Image (spheres, rainbow, N blue to C red):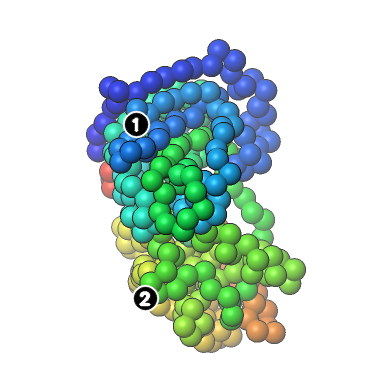
Amino acid sequence: MELKTLSDLEIITTSNSKINEVDFENLTFGTVFTDHMLVCDFENGKWEKPVIKPYAPFLIDPSAKVFHYGQAIFEGMKAFKDEQDDVWLFRPDENFHRFNKSATRMAMPEVPEDVFMGGLHKLLEIEKEWVKKGKGNTLYIRPFMIATGHGVIAAPSQSYRFMIILSPARAYYSGEVKVVIAEHFSRAANGGIGAAKAAGNYSAQFYPTKLANDQGYQQIIWTDDATHTKLEEAGTMNVFFRINDTIYTAPTSERILDGVTRKSVIELAKKENINVEVRSVLVEELIAAAKDGSLKEIFGAGTAAVINPIVGFGYKEEYFELPKIENSMALEIKEKLTNIQYKLAEDTFGWTVKI
Ligand SMILES: *Cc1c(COP(=O)(O)O)cnc(C)c1O
């Protein structure tokens, strides 16, 4: 895929880089940002000229609709540096298209490809020193859009701001993850906004996740809202179950976000001759498999952690510990996928895009 470049982009650089103050060995995920950001405003029915400028807070009217009605969407992507000091993106077209799908669902304007892709390309060229070499080092990319229009009338905003900010990160490790299966709360419902990367989907998860944390679980396995019998996602990740030597994941739907990592895991597993089945897995199936020993692994899949192995799950009053296994499919798939991302293995899928 060719990235489009922008001819009409204003660039204001800082001569005061923070890079030497950053301890790249000890980064807390998503807390340090690079020197520059991309900003593009939508006013009077059209996108204005995008600007790359020094990272800084900005003024916004207290009545802006983002504060009152949560008209806000985002994406999560990563850049990687290979041994030749080239910077690469992983399937960025998927994030771009999903971003505009989310925009449509939230009654927001679509962002043009030259602003999103061309802007990202330029921003990464400027910030390439922030992408560190070596497996485990990445630059997390956060494109987002907020409704900036004034007035507390409950109607879509007329003005929007699209931005891209960048955060250096180490491989995300969340420790041993225990999950609890949701019996009451839901992440998404048919006809709702669960398939969009809308900010409100996340705030709606915070309270049930806090209750789960109080019970000793790090995350929730979300079930379908109507019956709570189908296993759908794990926290903010798609979820896979390995029963015997087959891995299962639910089909995407209005309740299940179409994750780039999820679809990459499926394609990669198929190529490695691992049996993959895309179908709903029922809570009762999982419990039966845990009891008879055929349940080998559960793992989450998402950009930040790539693959996140789960050590056990709770359901009603019971806790089921997963077996410690030698040949983890989750870790094998993670290794293969990250080798492609860091250009340590040949990318036969054409997923990687050079900056
Ligand atoms: C972002 C997200 C994912 C993972 O998507 P990736 O494209 O793999 O990062 C999964 N579930 C939800 C709810 C998400 O918001």
Closer to the camera, 164 or 302?
164
Amino acid type, label 2 = Arg
Expressed as whole percent of the image width and height from the top left, the position of residue 4 reads: 26, 31
Cα distance between the residues tagged 1 and 2:
44 Å
Observer-side mark, 1 or 2, equals 1
Residue 249 image point, x, y percent: 41, 70
Q: Using the image as rendered, state which of residue 95 and residue 136 is in the foreground.
A: 95
Mark 2 crowdedness (10 Å alpha carbons): few <14, some 14-19, many ≥20: few
> Horizontal and vertical percent for residue 171?
57, 44
- Element marked by disc 2: loop
> Label for residue 332?
none
Circle 2 residue: 279
**Secondary structure found at label 1:** loop
Residue occupying image coordinates x 62% and y 43% = 29
Which residue is drawn at the image coordinates 58% and 44% (left, top)? 62
Q: Which of 238 and 116 lies nearest the eye of the viewer? A: 116
User: Is residue 99 among the parts visible in the rendering?
Assistant: no
Q: Which residue in the protein does label 1 denote? A: 48
Vertical side of 304 occupied by 245: above or below: below
| Quadrant holding the N terminus | top left
Left or right? Give the position of 59 relative to 143: right
Depicted 205 relative to depicted 72: above or below:
below
Task: Name the image quarter holding the C terminus.
Answer: top left
Which is more N-terminal, label 2 or label 1? Answer: 1
Query: What type is the residue that disc 1 sits on?
Result: Glu
Which image quadrant for residue 266?
Answer: bottom left
What residue appears at the point 59 percent right and 18 percent down from the top-left corner? 17
Is residue 96 visible from the viewing direction of this image?
yes
The residue carrying pointer 1 sits among few (fewer than 14), some (14 to 19) or many (20 or more) residues within 10 Å by Cα, namely some
Which picture quadrant has residue 246? Answer: bottom left
Identify the residue at the far left of this view: 2
Q: What residue is at 56 percent from the left and 84 percent from the top?
A: 287
